[in-house]
Image (spheres, grey):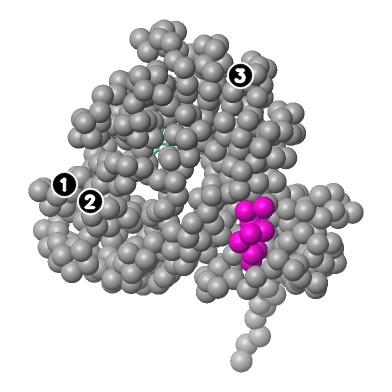
Amino acid sequence: MAQIYKPQPRQAKNKPVLAQTVVGLDHQGRGVIRTPQGVRFVANALPGETVNVMVDGKYTASLLKVLEPSAHREKPPCDYYQSCGGCDFQHLELTAQVTHKQQTVQEMLRKFAGIEAQAWLTPLQADAWHYRRRARLAVHFDRKRQQLTLGFRASQSKRIVAIDSCLTLAQPLNKLLKPLRDLVANLALAKHLGHVELIEFAQQPVVLLRIATRIEQSDRTQLEVFAEANNVAVWLAYEHSVEPLVATQILPQYHTDGAMLSCQPTDFIQSHRQLGQTMVAQALAWLDVQVNEPVIELFAGSGHFTIPLAQAGAKVTAIEGVISMVEQLQHNATANGVAVDAFCANLEQPWPQQSWGGKTYKKALLDPARAGAAMAVEEIAKRNIARIVYVSCAPDTLARDAATLKAHGYALKRAQVIDMFPQTHHIEVITLFERE
Ligand SMILES: C[S@@+](CC[C@H](N)C(=O)[O-])C[C@H]1O[C@@H](n2cnc3c(N)ncnc32)[C@H](O)[C@@H]1O
């Protein structure tokens, strides 16, 4: 047989294996080590552990072996844990997760705002498994192999990890994973599907298909059979609109503290099936709302805090940036027999141009997205509002905004972690600021 030259596969560059002690945990839940080249962050490593690592980036190293484990290390119960990008804290015992979350907020407030909370309340916790009421599943149809993959993205990657079950997903959604995959694989639509969302609502779960084309009748029929068999509502989200598969389908509903609210399935809802309501009750208690007191609520969504505030007797002015959510909030107020002034505005802009910007408010409640509320806290502070409850899902922007409030004479009276995202490093915290 003729000999031909075959190139050898390129050897991966030999990188040294280092034995290191983990000296801390960063705000993304990664272990911190000090190597001769500088600080590196190591996913899955815990403080106090001795580990073998390989430096694989300017700021990162990968964990090869745990030589001496931490007393807080747990065996992750999920089969997909090493590959799926959804959870990153299953290897850490739950109490230690929550302690770490509180310490992270404390450190950020100290470092970026020079602030200590006057009191830290015991963290609010509920189910730590099967708690998530919203999930986005990635879909890929391999045309060559005629094969469908439905699952979560791998960590830091576009790769999809096919999953049959998820330990953090609410059970009514978890049960849908297998039948949903079988269904989607048979749809002509599978090739045009952006992704699929599963959302748990009060009446029944919603399966939301993000699609780029109109659907064929054969797909429609299959989806109707699936909806009936699994007691779910199917909704279709196009680029600029969302509609139910069945025209008579009513809007989904969710519970808030003392009320039932409707929303579009594409609207934001709090991710923990129990702690959403708990958090509203806590915010109302901390605001200590009095009857007829003027309260401004920012980043109001479809009324999750607004309606209970109005039910408690406050005269609420609610601001939200998405017009359809403002309309929904108004509808929810009417349906629950309360009056609310709701306005659509971009809260990154100053308020003087706004009709509601010139009114007097005694108290404020804000629940921004991760970007925080830089402009809104400037505006609140200028108005001499006595008491502010700020709910945050990002301690870095909370610390930045807390610095603004401190500069205007506010003190951080109380803070409390709400464990809204167990088994992940994500943090939710509720804070109370008052003028000194
Ligand atoms: C974390 S959600 C909270 C929603 C609501 N408070 C709840 O509990 O369901 C943040 C809300 O702020 C809105 N939002 C984000 N950026 C905004 C902006 N620049 N101006 C006004 N609203 C904004 C979003 O549309 C979303 O409804």
Dot 2 or dot 1, earlier in sequence = 2
Q: Is residue 399 magenta?
A: no
What's the mark number on residue 235? 2
Residue 435 - label: 3
Q: CA distance from mark 3 to mark 1?
A: 45 Å
The mark tally for this picture is: 3
Q: Is residue 387 above or below residue 242?
A: above
Q: Is residue 93 magenta?
A: yes
What amino acid type is highlighted by mark number 2? Trp
- Tell me residue 33's x, y (percent): 81, 55
Give the magenta range: 91-99
Which residue is disc 1 drawn over? 250
Q: Quadrant of the N terminus?
A: bottom right
Determine crowd level at label 2: few under 14, some 14-19, many 20+ residues with C-alpha closer than 10 A.
many
As drawn, the residue found furthest toward the front would be 291
Q: Residue at x 28, y 71 (%)?
A: 179
Of pointers 3 and 1, the one earlier in the residue sequence: 1
Residue at image coords 31%, 46%:
255
Query: For the residue marked with disc 3, what is the amino acid?
Result: Arg
